[in-house]
Image: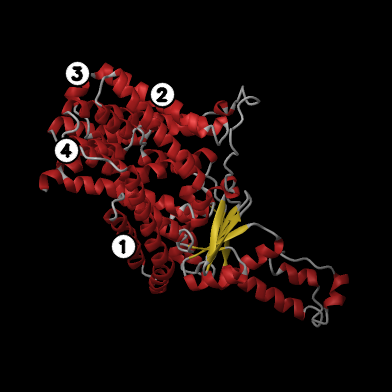
Amino acid sequence: MHDYMVLMALALAISVGLSLLFRRVGLPLLVGYVLAGMVVSGLFGFRYDQNDLLRGVAELGVVFLLFTVGLEFSVQRFHQMRREVLLIGGGQVALTTAIFTAGGSMLFNLPFTIALIIGMSLSLSSTAIVLKTLYENRDIGKPYGNTALGILLFQEISVVPMLLLVGFLAQEGEISLWWLFLETAVGATIAFAVIYFSGRHLVSRLLAGVGDMRSREAFVALVLLMVISAALLTHSLGFSYSLGAFLAGLILAETKYRYQVEADLVPFRDLLLGVFFITVGMQIDLQFTWEYLWWILFATLVLMGLKTVLAFTVVRLAGTREVALKTSLAIAQGGGFSFAVLELALRLELLSPQLHQMVVVTLVFSMLAAPFVLKAIHNDGGWLARDPGADAGRPLIKPIEQPASAASHSLTICHGDSCQQVALDAHTIVVCGYGPMGQSVVAKLRQAGFSYVCIEHQQALVDEGVARGDIVMFGNAAQQEILVRAGVQDAWSVIITVEDEKSKRMIGKAVASISETPLLVTFTTHPEELALWQELPVKGMVDQPLETAQLLVSRALRRAAQPHGVSRREAASAKGGETVVDKKSAASTGAE
């Protein structure tokens, strides 16, 4: 165990150094993790497949990634995506498997069994790389992001019958494809039913109880328990761990806790995903790679090119040319579950070690290229949208309708069992805190017709605000992930209404770290605290004792103005010139 910990620490150190270098030159950080794994594997002979603990930790990264993906969707939206999942996802897996199987049999004279195993493994793509990059680029809600997600979800489900099929091939017995399909469908139905009903009727109540405790540790522990339990359930039914995590995220997406849950789990997800990408690099045998480097590079180009063409053919049936092209490029690489299929075939002696290593290294090289391809898609500048044959290239079937919320920044606000999408524009004002002052601020903004969203971490106040019709989301405003969800990076201004000075400063620092030019407005009850705010870009600071004193004096002088012969203009000057009323209007207000 000690040796493994030392090697993992070394791998993390190398990956951090490479990540800093890559950040400086503008290269994807994921490549740094993969190269770190290659260095550790080459220098110390440490192999990923030789340690079950490391494989488990790496798989947890994908589990938490799929859970956060599930939080992006609801059951209703997943139902809307059934065509992406079943039609396009199924078509991509079937067509890619068939073409690669036929090519392996006819071009390389591979036995049908071996060609089929390789074809199935090559049809899969990297869920971890694609979804993580789509999240970072904020492309997950775009049409091609939705389509890519649907294909990846079908691939997740298809891994189960693939692994079962490899086992049947090793036994050389008769294979009942109908039985495989039935077993997969029944297992998926059971998993969804258990997770759905337990999530709707049990987990939400548990989260409410823990939320009343105001214990972040207990809240995070309960969420971790739910994710791992759902993953264990689907794995016990023969599916991947990550599929259960995705279903759990789907259920939590329809609760008011979705954004806080995501914010609390992001550190776990990112750290464990780093381990996953390090293990991807550990798959490579450097000596073998150097010996067959040119063949591997050629195979990588063929793999990505052919997968792009085949995926484009399928997606184009139900989408525009732009969506089809971007989606096919995004999923052109190999995937982590490809290794599972190939490893099982190697263990059952269906693949030779040399052929296994050739396919594995080719897959890893394609995964190394994937971040660059995804970055190019994000920064395409519109050239992928140009369609010279638009008049003759319409989809053969009705295009998939994307959710309206994908086109603009929106929030899901839940109250009880009902949820609604709230669109936020570029002039949204973010209010941090829904206490008495926050409620007054929200009321003024609503009366003035401003777009706003309020962040509150006490669920009783959240329920009160939503029941009142206010836009209040559950979350800790001191966490960057919550502020990003509220749209602080594009907000017109941020008003901090919480009373605790330490909490106010934490929120202010979090806002300043997200927005380059934040417009922060807050108040203080202690004048000596003003010096602590100088390091933050506060544009409006209300000194509550001073402002209150000025207001009290102004009100007192206003009422005493007429009996003592003091003009209303002179009384207003005691307030610092805030209000100016002429003598003619004084007569009309003298009765006050």
Would you name the residue on which mark 4 appears? 347
Comparing 161 with 303, the one in front is 161
> Disc 3 marks which amino acid?
Glu
Q: Residues within 10 Å of mark 2 (few under 14, many from 20)?
A: some
Q: Earlier in the sequence, mark 4 or mark 1?
A: 1
Q: Nearer the viewer, mark 3 or mark 2?
A: 2
Q: Residues within 10 Å of mark 4 (few under 14, many from 20)?
A: few
Comparing 504 with 563, the one in front is 504
Q: What quarter of the picture does the C terminus occupy?
A: bottom right
Secondary structure of residue under mark 2: helix
Q: Is residue 217 above or below residue 31?
A: below
Q: CA distance from mark 3 to mark 4?
A: 24 Å
Circles 4 and 1: CB distance less than 8 Å? no
Q: Give the residue at x 78% y 78%.
A: 561
Q: Residues within 10 Å of mark 3 (few under 14, many from 20)?
A: few
Counting from the top left corner in percent of width and height, residue 4 is at 14, 44
Please state the total of marks drawn on the protein image. 4
Q: Does residue 518 appear to the left or right of 292 in the view shown?
A: right
Q: CA distance from mark 4 to mark 1?
A: 32 Å
Q: Earlier in the sequence, mark 3 or mark 1?
A: 1
Q: Is residue 69 above or below residue 557?
A: above
Counting from the top left corner in percent of width and height, residue 72 is at 47, 52
Would you name the residue on which mark 1 appears? 225
Would you name the residue on which mark 3 appears? 291
Would you name the residue on which mark 2 appears? 305
